[in-house]
Amino acid sequence: MGIAGYRRHALFYFGYYGALGAFSPYIGRWVAANGHGGWAVGAMLALWYAGRMVAPPAWARLTGHSAVPGHWLVGGCALALLGFAAFLRLDTGVGLFVAMAWFALFFNAVVPQFEALTLSALGPRSHDYGRVRVWGSVGFLLVAGSYGALLDRFGDDAFVPLVLPWLALTLAAAWPHRRTPAVAPSAELRPAVWRRPGARRLLGVALLVQLGFGPFYVFYTLHLQAHGHDGLSVGLLWSVGVLCEIAMFWYAPALIRRYGAARVIAISLAASVARWALVATQADSLALMALAQATHALGFAAFHAGCMRRMAELFPDRRDMNSAQGLLYGISSGFGGVLGAGVSALAWQLGGGFAAFLVGAAVTLAALVLHLAAARFGRAVPIAESR
C-alpha cells in the first residue's frame, strides 16, 4: 500500500495538530482577554503539562487491556472536544481550571495511541512515517499562521468557536479507526518496555531534547522582541521553522533509508546545539535567526522521524508499541516539558535569553553525548511485520 493508502491517518494528524496550532499560541491570549492575570496563564500551562505527564502512560495501560482499543481512541477525542466546548461557559473561576484539566488529560492521551496505530499500520515501512505525519505540520502552520489575524478581526471571544471545528475534525478522523482490532495476548514472557536494550537511552535522549526546547517554547518570542524584532518579523521566523519542518518530514524517509535512524538523530542533535547557541548569541541578526529557524527541519522534524523509526526498531511487536509510545510521551513531552519550562524560567531570570538558550544548547549537547555513547551508525534496521 502506497502512502496514499494512509489518508485516514494523515487526516487525523491534520485535525489534531490544527487544533494544537490554535491552542498553543493563543490560549494565553484568550485567558488574559478574559481578565485573568499572569498567574492564571501559568496555572493553565501547568495543567497542560501535567496532562502530558499523566495521560499518555495511563491511557496506554487502559487501551492495552481493551478488546476494542479503537473505541477508546474515538472516546478520547469526543471527551477532548467536550472538555474544550466547556470553555464556552466556564471561562472564569474554578470552572476554567476544571475544563482545562479535563481537556489536557484527554487531548494529550490520544496522540501516543494514534502514533502506535500509525507505526503498526506502516509495519516495515516505518521509515515513511514522516510523509504521513507531515500533514500535522501543515495543519499547525495553517492555523497558527492565520488565527492571530482572525482573532484581531472577530475578537478574542471567537477563540473557542474557532478551535472547536478542528477538534470535531479530529473526532471524525478517529471514527474510521474505531474497529482497530486488539492484539491477541501472548504467553511469551517479555520484559517491561523500559527495560528493553536501548529503550532507556532513547527515552533519556528524548527527555533532554524536550528540556532543551524549553527556552524556545516559552521565551523565543520575548527574546526576539528584546533584540528589536517587530511582530511581523517574529511571525515570519516562526513560519520559516514550520515550513522547513514540513519539507523535512516529506524527505525524512529517504534520509532514514539511506543513513539509518541513529545517524539522522545524531545530525539532528548537533544541529540543535548550534541552533540554540546561535539564538543565544546572535539574536540581533534577522538573517542569522532565519538560518537558525531553518535548522528546525533537523532539530524537530528529522529528530522526531528518526525517533519514531527507533521506536519501531525497538518495539516491532504491536503488543508493546502502545505502552512504549505512552511512556515516550509521558517522559519527553510531559516530564521534559515541565523541566524545560522550569529550568528555562530560572535561566531567564538570572541572565535573560542569552542564559536560557545557552542552557538549551548545553542540555542538547548532553543528549548528543548520550546518543553517541551507544549509537550504531549503520543503515536502517529491517523491521519484520508486527505479530
Image: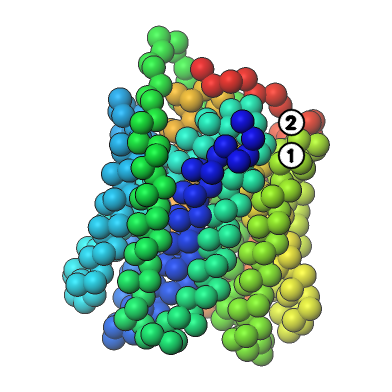
Asked whether disc 1 touches disc 2, contact meaning CB atoms under 8 Å apart, the reply is yes
Dot 2 falls on a residue whose secondary structure is loop
Report the label total.
2
Asked if residue 16 lies left or right of residue 219, the reply is left
Q: How is the image coloured?
A: rainbow
Q: Quadrant of residue 294?
A: bottom right
Question: What is the x, y in percent for residue 66?
Answer: 30, 28
**Above or below: residue 257 compared with residue 167:** above
Residue found 30% across the figure and 57% down from its top: 81
Q: Nearer the viewer, residue 14 or 340?
A: 14
| Residue that badge 1 annotates | 256
Residue found 76% across the figure and 54% down from its top: 270
The crowd level at tag 1 (other Cα within 10 Å; few <14, some 14-19, many 20+) is: many
Q: Quadrant of the N terminus?
A: top right
**Above or below: residue 260 compared with residue 289:** above
Question: What is the x, y in percent for residue 204?
Answer: 57, 43
Identify the disc placed on residue 380: 2
Residue found 40% across the figure and 37% down from its top: 177
Query: Callout 2, which amino acid?
Result: Ala
Q: Is residue 385 visible?
A: yes
